[in-house]
Image (cartoon, coloured by chain):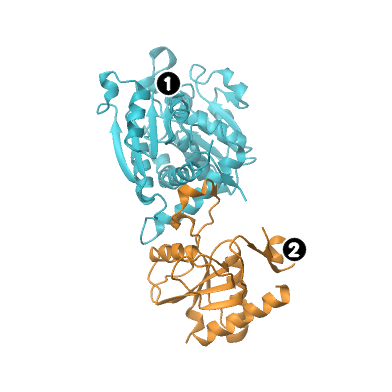
Amino acid sequence: MDSEAIEKAIRRMAHEIVERHESPSRIVLAGIPTRGVEVARRLADHIEKIEGVRPYLGTLDISMHRDDLSTRGKVTALEVTDLPVDLDNRPLVLVDDVFFTGRTTRAALDALASFGRPSTIQRAVLVDRGHRELPIRADYVGKNLPTAREEKIRVRFENLDGTPDSVVVIKP
Amino acid sequence: MSTWTRKDLTGLDDLSAAEITFLLDTARAFKGVGNRNLKKVPALRGKTLVNFFVEPSTRTRTSFEVAAMRLSADVVNISATASSLQKGETLKDTALNLQALQADIIVLRHSSPGSPQFLAGRLDSSIINAGDGAHEHPTQGLLDIFTIREKFGRIEGLHIAIVGDILFSRVARSNIFGLLKLGAKVTLVGPSTLVPKSFEKLGVRVTHRIDDILGDVDVVNLLRIQHERQRKEYFPGLGEYVSLFGLTKARAAKLKPSCLIMHPGPINRGVEIDSDIADGDQSVILEQVTNGIAVRMAVLYSCAGGAGVPA
């Protein structure tokens, strides 16, 4: 995907999110670091253009809720979780760049439970690459990208990485 | 992206600036857990942590205990009097028994410098140093540095005074190692018996006159006068100490308004610090306690996760 395709996919997802929510100003878009936060920010920009109101934007670090701490062998830096508003009875959309095994989503659902009780939790992803290991699905998908298990997906955003927006499948 | 691959934390002297920064950043993320509705995350679910305190301690042990519980670990406390060390068992044998009990993490406080290092090399469990003699107390050093960084947004270029009983202080040593690695300027202040000039070899400045530095420092970290460790010949007497080194109201008035006043506790009101000053606006003494939980969560989390690396 090039920057135009990414832009189009995010815009379409923004429309879908708006269609399925009565009052978009109450939505919380919670991005999973690092690039999920950027996808969430872009979704918020589009929703603001469409509806004239901006949804709440938050960051949800799920590292401390994962179940594979002792098998990873190394620990990577954690981001500060920042949810700008009480989640109780609000619709929440969990945003990430790549949807893979579903384990991140499971950890995120667990993490969210310690902050409050959203009325609904939905899942928006820029790329769905398949290979789910848990009974979890996405509500909004930018692009379905069939991959082999051992392949990797590399997402780059110009404002974070200094290279043009792109989604590339990397062969092992 | 920075990563952590150690199973143990024995001292800040062993760590690189990047590793110290990693722990501080991780602690920042964990600090938020204390403000949630549900102050608990499952990261160490199913792990067993043993607080093995051969020297008495309440606050450090409690802080580790709270940190471990917030990470969902199971905690067992063993104190000196309850342990078999009293019955003549060696430290190594006691520790091997703890490992045989399948402790994943052992938090050790011991009067012998180097004892955490000794166990770290011999056990598969993660060893966290909670104070070894007069050597290091890395989590206290980290929480002090975390508190400073939280207030100023940086460590580099700050001038930090550590005042009091430096000679016997593991807190001072961990602070010195950590602060210097992150680019701070450190001045040690105290009587020449407790702050010998030889400390300058570490890269710090030493002065015996607190009044010379009050107007220049960004932080004063006052160490507790450890009555229990003092020998008469080192120490002038409490009255004389207060008049020469105590942070009295008159001295506090000479500090920059932005200067932080810190103390690892427990404070001796009227000795190291005037009672009103300890409760004043510049004092962050109680914030240090709260930050201690976050820092210890970060250390436990990182060492438990880093333990998976084959050596």
Chain of the residue on which disc 1 is drawn? B
Same chain for marks 1 and 2?
A: no
Residue B247 drawn at (x, y percent): 46, 33
> Does B244 sit above or below residue B141?
above
Q: Residue at x 42, y 70 (%)?
A: A86
- State the residue position of label 2: A163
Name the residue furthest top.
Answer: B233
Q: Which chain is orange?
A: A
Q: How many marks?
A: 2
Residue B215 visible somewhere in the drawing? no
User: Looking at this view, is A61 or A27 the one in front?
Assistant: A61
- State the residue position of label 1: B240
Quarter of the picture holding the C terminus of chain B: top right
User: Looking at this view, is B80 or A142 the one in front?
Assistant: A142
Displayed quadrant of residue B206: top right
Q: Residue at x 62, y 80 (%)?
A: A46
Residue B267 drawn at (x, y percent): 38, 34
How would you rate the neighbour count of disc 2 (Cα within 10 Å): few for under 14, some for 14-19, many for 20 or more? Answer: few
Left of A50 or right of it: where is A114?
A: left
> Does B39 sit above or below residue A26?
above
User: Looking at this view, is B39 or B193 the one in front?
Assistant: B39
- Check the rendered structure and report the hue given to chain B: cyan
Image marks 1 and 2: residues in contact by CB distance under 8 Å: no
Name the kind of residue labelled 2 in the image. Answer: Thr
Image depth: mark 1 or mark 2 in front? 2
Q: Residue at x 70, y 65 (%)?
A: A159
Residue B191 drawn at (x, y percent): 50, 20
Left of A116 or right of it: where is A34?
A: right
